[in-house]
Amino acid sequence: MSSWKVVLGIAKTHLISKMKSTVTATLGVTFGIGAYITLVSFMTGLNTMLDDLILNQTPHVHLYNEVAPSQQQPAYLYRDFENAITIVHSVKPKQNQQKIHNALPIISYLKNNPEVKGATPQLRAQIFYLSGAQDLGGNLLGVDIMEEERLSNIQDYIVEGSPRDLKNNVNGVILGAGLVKKMSLQLGNRIQVRSTNGSTIPLKIVGVYQSGIAEIDDVQSYANLSTVQNLLGEAKNYITDINIKLHDLKDAPQFARRLEHQFSVKAVDINEANAQFETGTTIRNMITYSVSVTLLIVAGFGIYNILNMLIYEKMKDIAILKATGFSGTDVLMIFMSQALIIGGLGGILGVLIGFGLSTVIDNIAFETEALPTITTFPINYNPLFYLIGISFAMISTAIAGFLPSQKAKRMDPVTIIRGT
């Protein structure tokens, strides 16, 4: 077998002598890999943005008291019906408080649990917003706003004001953007809030919240937990919801079932709360990767065709090489070297073009009222995409070069010369 220096020298000479074919093959690799990186970076970035829009606003585990009929009806306890089939019609929900029993000890327990990153209390109240002649129904959420900021990305959706402004103002409120628009309000205005029991308090608007989900922005607002407790005339241990963030999201379903059994409350994990959304995300990801793989496969066939034609154009050279003492293996290595050189150059250029196009898209303005915190199109700069791109370029060109090189290896130089 000839030395690698000779093999690479001949491969280089072939590539330079057929510059047009070499450039065409290299560009085939370049644009295939560049298009793949651009497409997968943009589509996965868009999917991540949509996921974050929903999932970042959902706790890993949500505790509350569910309004539901009792599972154990009195008729089931009557011994005469013990071995009979009992059907109870028109079952009504049992009388139950909305508050979580022993909420403060539960929160203390959760905060000391090594699996838990944090637990925040909430008090959800049905209210009416009063401003002039307008009277709108909605929800007022009492929260520990600084804990909410630490454990979630709520600050990303506060388009005016800040979480600390609410913390520093006992009678402050962060209104949904839909409410602000409907009631012609602005930062610093005061709004009357009336509870379902008739009590009314004035609150100062210290922030505007816009989640991008109109159904939330049109009804929901945030106030300090103590403010909502005072509005409802309840004690400081009156809490209707507890939101839990775990260190590992995968533990949420099992952790929720454990809390239900331990504290006799309803516990909804993030997968259960967003089951339909998760299905949509899975389908979008399947489409993204299917299109990306298809693009790579099409690029691979193009690379094969170009290299195949390049080798057939070198038939005379193959005959001369074999006639001068080069073995079939030498011929195979010469053309494999050409294929890998084309793959390497095309892959590197493709990665650069993919990164460049992704950067251009990342800087294109994307403004919508539904997503105030998103100013440009989302791009996912995952290094894995670039690694896959360069790896595919090398593997596809190696395969594309190997198949016709094997044919060239077995060719009889006498047959080639006679054919000319």
Image (cartoon, helix red, strand yellow):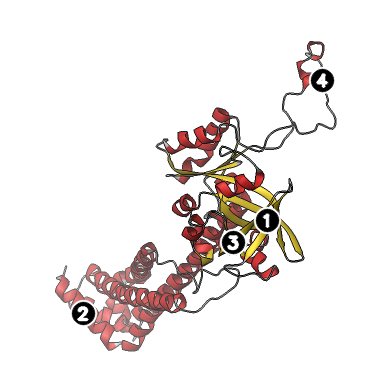
Q: Are marks 2 and 3 in contact (CB under 8 Å)?
A: no
Residue under label 1: 193
The quadrant in which residue 299 appears is: bottom left
Which secondary structure, mark 3?
strand
Number of numbered callouts drawn: 4
- Image check: 151 left or right of 392? right
Viewer-nearest residue: 32 or 324: 32
In the picture of the structure, the residue carrying the numbered disc 3 is 204
Above or below for 304 versus 201: below
Specify the quadrant of the image occupied by residue 5. bottom left
Inter-mark Cα distance, 2 to 1: 84 Å
The answer, for residue 289, to whether it is visible in the render is no
| Mark 1 vs mark 3, CA separation in Å | 10 Å
Q: CA distance from mark 2 to mark 4?
A: 90 Å
Q: Amino acid at mark 4?
A: Ile
Q: Read off the residue under disc 4.
A: 85
Q: Secondary structure at mark 1?
A: strand
In depth, the one of 162 and 382 nearer the eye is 162
| Residue type beneath disc 3 | Lys
* The C terminus - image quarter: bottom left
Q: Which residue is denoted by mark 2 in the rendering?
A: 10
Q: Say which residue appears at 50% left-offset and 79% top-offset.
A: 365
The CA distance from mark 4 to mark 1 is 51 Å
Q: Residues within 10 Å of mark 2 (few under 14, many from 20)?
A: some
Decide which of tag 2 and tag 1 comes sooner along the chain.
2
Tell me how far mark 2 sits from mark 3, CA to CA.
80 Å
